[in-house]
């Protein structure tokens, strides 16, 4: 399948300056995309663009990743209603290192060059920047940006000169990479269109060259209308220290039916024929969540590897009752303790104390009410006992649950 067809089918086409999208099907193109080091990890929102980049690389194009050490010192204001808090130089350095490490792992074995725009901005003087860049950018063009209009409006919070000038910095990045790396294409999310245009215009005005943009739609949860990303709250990170592989796996398992086809196209490398077979099997019994399970398997493997995937599957199997807790390996138990509350106790201890100590009940009184109301289960079996007994344990372990939610489960182990 040609790259333009692949990207169209997968939903990676939003806006482009190419008159004909089949232009990307020809000779190898050097392209770049930028990452704002505003955090020390990518989210699944960032990962969507990385997956599109993967298709460009697999089609023979040369990729350059720009980690924005310079732009990160200002912060992209586009879409923000207020001025962003400035990060310290040390924070930016840590974030750059962590993000670069993630991308190297994600693109392991692929041809990828990583650059930092701080390297070419650190020695550029203010007057040099005004003469080299500012002289060629009409103020009317900058004032026309939607986020500038919003911030300058009657109900806007205003905008600093630093954030107002952000597009000039990003525009110069494109010009620099055009000159130094031969980059003629920038790929980005749809929310970056305005910043990308600044670079195309600079290349045309200063270098007399032609450059292009390709943007992909932002990934949206169709059930909630909220985009995937770190700024929306409840972010799903690629760093296992911020979102464990098990929580990452379960995020995809719990994805909505309305969006699962889109997520499979964006976040996996499954071919069209195989993906259609997955959806057909899913349609036979949507309650079995076959598509979500395959999605979770593919994405977790891509991001965290086979070992983490197997552990996440084993932990999930214990939580849903498909695997006995007594047979869980040490690595699975370690991962399980990171997901739910755990406590050590004697075999004849109080169930009330267990519920309170694990946070499943806020008080002894609530614990008694939950037990009396038949809301507590042990290893999937309802119980009204206020005291533990050895028969409840499976190889010195048991799972206690309040209600039906996985998050309201605790691991109890014998001392």
Image (cartoon, rainbow, N blue to C red):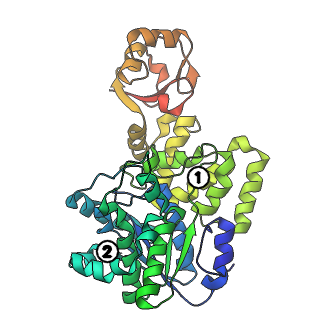
Relative to 400, residue 105 above or below? below
| 397 on left or right of 284 | left
Q: Nearer the viewer, residue 141 or 379?
A: 141
Residue 147 is situated, as x and y percent measured from the top left of the image, at 46, 57
Could you classify mark 1 by the number of other residues whose Cα lies within 10 Å: few (under 14), some (14-19), or many (20 or more)?
A: some
From the viewer's perspective, is 350 left or right of 60? left
Task: Say which quadrant the C terminus sits in.
Answer: top left
Q: Quadrant of the N terminus?
A: bottom right
Q: Is residue 64 visible?
A: yes
> Please, is residue 179 above or below residue 399 in the view?
below
At 41% from the left and 74% from the top, the residue drawn is: 65
Task: Give how far across and how far down residue 53 sits, in percent.
Answer: 52, 72
Residue located 49% across and 9% down the image: 369
Q: Secondary structure at mark 2?
A: loop
Residue 49 picture location, percent across and down? 51, 65
- The residue closer to the viewer here, 172 or 352, is 172
The numbered dot on residue 220 is 1
- Quarter of the figure with residue 64: bottom left
Q: Is residue 58 above or below residue 281?
A: below
**Does the rendering let one see residue 111?**
no
Q: Which residue is mark 2?
A: 117
Q: What residue lies at 29% left-to-right and 82% top-to-bottom?
A: 131
Name which residue lies at 57% across and 14% down.
374
Which of 230 and 160 lies nearest the eye of the viewer? Answer: 160
**Looking at the rendered structure, which numbered label has been put on residue 130?**
none
Q: CA distance from mark 2 to mark 1?
A: 30 Å
Q: Earlier in the sequence, mark 2 or mark 1?
A: 2
Where does residue 357 sit, x and y in percent of width and height? Answer: 35, 21
Instruction: Tell me if label 2 and label 1 are in contact, CB under 8 Å.
Output: no
SS at badge 1: loop
Query: Is residue 259 shown above or below 115?
Result: above
Crowd rating for badge 2 (residues with CA inside 10 Å; few <14, some 14–19, many 20+)? many
């Amino acid at each position: 399948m040609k790259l333009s067809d692949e990207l169209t089918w997968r939903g990676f086409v939003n806006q482009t300056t190419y008159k004909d999208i089949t232009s990307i099907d020809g000779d190898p193109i050097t392209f770049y995309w930028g990452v704002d080091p505003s955090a020390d990890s990518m989210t699944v929102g960032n990962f969507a663009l990385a997956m599109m980049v993967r298709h460009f690389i697999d089609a023979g194009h040369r990729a350059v990743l720009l980690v924005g050490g310079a732009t990160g010192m200002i912060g992209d204001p586009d879409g923000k209603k207020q001025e962003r808090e400035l990060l310290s130089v040390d924070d930016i350095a840590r974030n750059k290192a962590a993000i670069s490490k993630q991308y190297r792992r994600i693109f392991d074995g692929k041809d990828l060059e990583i650059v930092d725009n701080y390297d070419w901005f650190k020695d550029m003087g203010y007057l040099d920047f005004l003469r080299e860049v500012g002289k060629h950018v009409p103020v009317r063009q900058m004032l026309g940006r939607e986020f500038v209009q919003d911030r300058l409006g009657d109900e806007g919070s205003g905008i600093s000169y630093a954030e107002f000038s952000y597009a000039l910095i990003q525009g110069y990045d494109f010009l620099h990479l055009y000159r130094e790396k031969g980059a003629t294409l920038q790929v980005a999310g749809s929310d970056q269109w305005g910043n990308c245009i600044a670079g195309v215009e600079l290349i045309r005005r200063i270098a007399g060259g032609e450059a292009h943009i390709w943007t992909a739609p932002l990934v949206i949860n169709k059930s909630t209308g909220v985009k995937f990303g770190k700024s929306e709250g409840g972010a799903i990170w690629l760093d296992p220290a911020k979102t464990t592989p098990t929580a990452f796996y379960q995020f995809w398992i719990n994805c909505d039916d309305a969006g699962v086809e889109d997520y499979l196209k964006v976040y996996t490398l499954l071919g069209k024929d195989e993906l259609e077979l997955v959806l057909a099997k899913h349609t036979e019994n949507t309650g079995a969540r076959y598509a979500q399970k395959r999605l979770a398997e593919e994405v977790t493997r891509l991001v965290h590897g086979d070992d983490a995937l197997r552990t996440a599957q084993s932990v999930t199997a214990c939580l849903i009752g498909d695997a006995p807790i007594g047979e869980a390996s040490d690595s699975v138990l370690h991962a399980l303790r990171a997901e739910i509350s755990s406590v050590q106790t004697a075999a004849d201890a109080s169930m009330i104390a267990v519920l309170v100590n694990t946070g499943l009940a806020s008080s002894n009184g609530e614990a008694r009410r939950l037990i009396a109301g038949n809301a507590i289960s042990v290893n999937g079996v309802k119980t009204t006992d206020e005291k533990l007994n050895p028969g409840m344990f499976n190889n010195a372990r048991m799972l206690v649950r309040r209600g039906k939610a996985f998050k309201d489960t605790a691991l109890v182990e014998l001392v």
